[in-house]
Image (tube, helix red, strand yellow):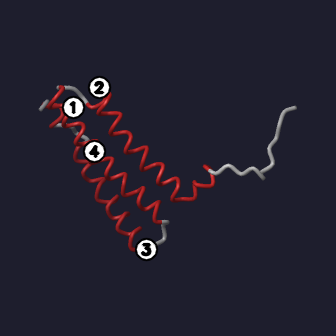
């Protein structure tokens, strides 16, 4: 692997950021204050992180490139972020945004 990837100065900060996030997930699960879909969306964000790490390693080993430079791996990893964001949106009541209500007043510029 590339020496710059191994000695990334942000790596310890990334590892430290997982602890508060896991603590948040633990609290959210135990408190039952969040809708289930929202909690699932937050948990899927961890899946996004895992998929991104695996994709970055594959990009480095197989293509000797950064993840951002291997479009199909980068796009696949980002799809998991989109999925978690959609589930979060739906969990916090976003299904109302997706619903089409024919009874709602519509304005026209006639």
Q: Residue at x 21, y 31 (%)?
A: 59
Q: Are marks 2 and 1 in contact (CB under 8 Å)?
A: yes
Where residue 100 sits in the image (x, y, percent)? 67, 49
Depth check: give the residue in front, 53 or 79. 79
Q: Which residue is mark 3?
A: 31
Q: Which residue is mark 2?
A: 69
Q: Tag on residue 51?
A: 4
Work out whether mark 4 precedes mark 2 in sequence or the reverse, and give the earlier one. 4
Residue 78 in the image: above or below residue 96: above
Separation (CA) of disc 1 from disc 4: 12 Å
Residue 107 in the image: above or below residue 41: above
Q: Residue at x 16, y 29 (%)?
A: 62
Q: Residue at x 31, y 53 (%)?
A: 17
The local secondary structure at tag 3 comes to helix
Q: Residue at x 43, y 62 (%)?
A: 39
Graded by Cα atoms within 10 Å as few (under 14), some (14 to 19) or many (20 or more), the crowding at tag 2 reads: few
Work out whether mark 2 precedes mark 1 in sequence or the reverse, and give the earlier one. 1
Residue 82 in the image: above or below residue 36: above
Work out whether mark 3 precedes mark 4 in sequence or the reverse, and give the earlier one. 3
Where residue 6 sits in the image (x, y, percent)? 15, 37
Work out whether mark 3 precedes mark 2 in sequence or the reverse, and give the earlier one. 3
Q: Which residue is mark 1?
A: 59
Quadrant including the N terminus: top left
Depth check: give the residue in front, 38 or 95. 95
The local secondary structure at tag 2 comes to helix
């Amino acid at each position: 692997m590339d020496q710059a990837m191994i000695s990334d100065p942000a790596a310890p900060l990334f590892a430290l950021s997982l602890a508060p996030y896991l603590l948040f997930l633990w609290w959210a699960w135990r408190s039952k204050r969040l809708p289930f879909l929202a909690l699932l969306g937050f948990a899927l964000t961890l899946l996004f992180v895992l998929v991104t790490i695996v994709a970055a390693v594959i990009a480095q080993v197989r293509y000797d490139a950064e993840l951002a430079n291997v479009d199909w791996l980068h796009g696949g990893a980002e799809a998991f972020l989109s999925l978690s964001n959609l589930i979060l949106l739906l969990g916090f009541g976003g299904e109302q945004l997706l619903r089409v209500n024919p009874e709602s007043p519509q304005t026209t510029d006639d």
